[in-house]
Image (tube, rainbow, N blue to C red):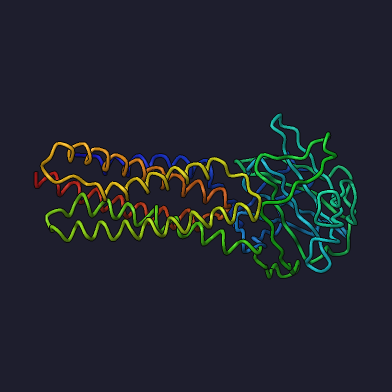
């Protein structure tokens, strides 16, 4: 039978598709030419991943003339506003920020905001201490990344740089006074414009968010498929395969459960709108609970109910594996963790697929 191979090939296909759509990291070793979209030269800019807590954000900058600085900030497009702040002390309050977003109709908006406080009413549009060059500001989307470009007049910009990304799908509107809703992600770094070196501070929830991702990746995305491999290909070592399968899946469930709980902690903490990711996660947990409960009512071998139990248990497991792998890649995209997380899990998944293929071929020959 080809069921397990089908699971992995389906998951690989789905997530290769997600990777094409979602993994759009812009390497700093490439020269970008956005001169048709931007009103200043972008080909000779320095490039840094300034905020180490979020390697998806790429900042390009250059001193284009006496007291003239050009900036180009990019990140994966998540239908959110994107902003960069210049601070004297590394704090949000008291800083000035350039913020841009794109509406669904293709209209782009860039505004300077004066960050007088953390409440939306104290984040004032069309105000701030930055001297923005006329007609230099623009926002555009290219290769599924949003780019915010602008120039400012100053001897040297503030070294303390902030970034913030708005909530998913909630853009400022004129009727709301173009107020910015609370960001879902933010960070602070100190940049030396001469050397290009930066020191970054992670946002307070970064550790929780990454722990959530790591636990779910290990539990649902690695241990659970390994448990399925053991159950399918090592039945000749009875009853070792059975107890190994149970033990691996119990650990998988525990890791996934803790990761699931942390997901709600992160969601409430950053007020993230991750409806699809959350709903898939809930479905995964429900299926996993059913799988655990199914073990408690497992009919005896050779009975007619056992045939239907096997059908349910095997197919529910296959659906669970496909949903888990897909949601892991989707979660990496939402978390904006960049190529390191994509690459690491993709390699692990590829190794599991390779092992499954080898074992499936061996099983066919034995039969």
Q: Residue at x 27, y 38 (%)?
A: 312
Residue 352, compared with residue 101, is above or below; it is below
Quarter of the figure with the N terminus? top left
Query: Taking 157 as reference, is 104 left or right?
Result: left
Q: Residue at x 15, y 53 (%)?
A: 235
From the top left corner, tell me how far across and down residue 299 is, in percent: 18, 44
Q: What residue occupies the far top of the structure in this picture?
A: 105
Q: Residue at x 86, y 61 (%)?
A: 94
Quarter of the figure with the C terminus? top left
Q: What residue occupies the far front of the structure in this picture?
A: 297
Q: Residue at x 39, y 40 (%)?
A: 13
Residue 201, compared with residue 253, is above or below; it is below
Q: Nearer the viewer, residue 279 or 214?
A: 279
From the top left corner, tell me how far across and down residue 259 is, in percent: 48, 57
From the top left corner, tell me how far across and down residue 41 is, in percent: 76, 48
Query: Taking 163 as reference, is 68 left or right?
Result: right
Examine the image and state in which quarter residue 230 appears.
bottom left
Q: Nearer the viewer, residue 193 or 96?
A: 96
Query: Taking 315 as reference, is 114 left or right?
Result: right
From the top left corner, tell me how far across and down residue 189 is, in percent: 71, 66
């Amino acid at each position: 039978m080809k069921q397990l191979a089908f699971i992995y090939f389906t998951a690989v296909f789905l997530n290769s598709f997600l990777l094409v759509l979602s993994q759009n990291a812009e390497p700093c070793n490439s020269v970008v030419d956005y001169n048709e979209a931007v009103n200043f030269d972008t080909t000779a800019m320095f490039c840094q991943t300034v905020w180490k807590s979020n390697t998806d954000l790429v900042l390009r900058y250059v001193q284009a003339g006496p007291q003239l600085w050009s900036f180009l900030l990019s990140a994966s497009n998540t239908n959110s506003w994107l902003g960069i702040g210049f601070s004297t002390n590394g704090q949000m309050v008291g800083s000035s920020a350039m913020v841009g977003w794109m509406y669904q109709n293709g209209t782009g908006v860039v505004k300077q905001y004066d960050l007088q406080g953390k409440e939306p009413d104290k984040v004032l549009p069309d105000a701030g201490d930055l001297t923005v060059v006329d007609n230099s500001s623009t926002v555009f989307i290219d290769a599924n990344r949003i780019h915010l470009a602008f120039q400012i007049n100053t001897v040297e910009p503030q070294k303390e740089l902030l970034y913030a990304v708005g909530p998913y799908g909630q853009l400022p509107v004129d009727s709301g006074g173009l107020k910015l809703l609370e960001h879902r992600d933010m960070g602070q770094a100190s940049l030396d414009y001469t050397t290009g070196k930066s020191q970054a501070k992670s946002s307070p929830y970064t550790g929780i968010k990454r722990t959530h991702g790591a636990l779910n990746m290990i539990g649902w995305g690695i241990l659970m498929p390994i448990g399925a491999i053991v159950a399918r290909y090592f039945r000749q070592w009875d009853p070792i395969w059975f107890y190994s399968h149970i033990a691996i899946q119990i650990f998988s469930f525990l890791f996934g459960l803790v990761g699931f709980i942390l997901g709600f902690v992160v969601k409430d903490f950053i007020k993230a709108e991750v409806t699809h990711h959350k709903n898939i996660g809930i479905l995964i947990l429900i299926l996993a609970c059913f799988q655990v409960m199914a073990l408690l009512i497992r009919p005896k071998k050779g009975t007619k109910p056992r045939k239907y139990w096997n059908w349910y248990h095997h197919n529910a497991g296959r659906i669970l594996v496909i949903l888990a792998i897909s949601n892991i890649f989707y979660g990496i995209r939402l978390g904006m963790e960049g190529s390191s997380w994509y690459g690491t899990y993709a390699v692990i998944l590829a190794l599991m697929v390779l092992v499954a293929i080898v074992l499936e071929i061996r099983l066919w020959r034995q039969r």
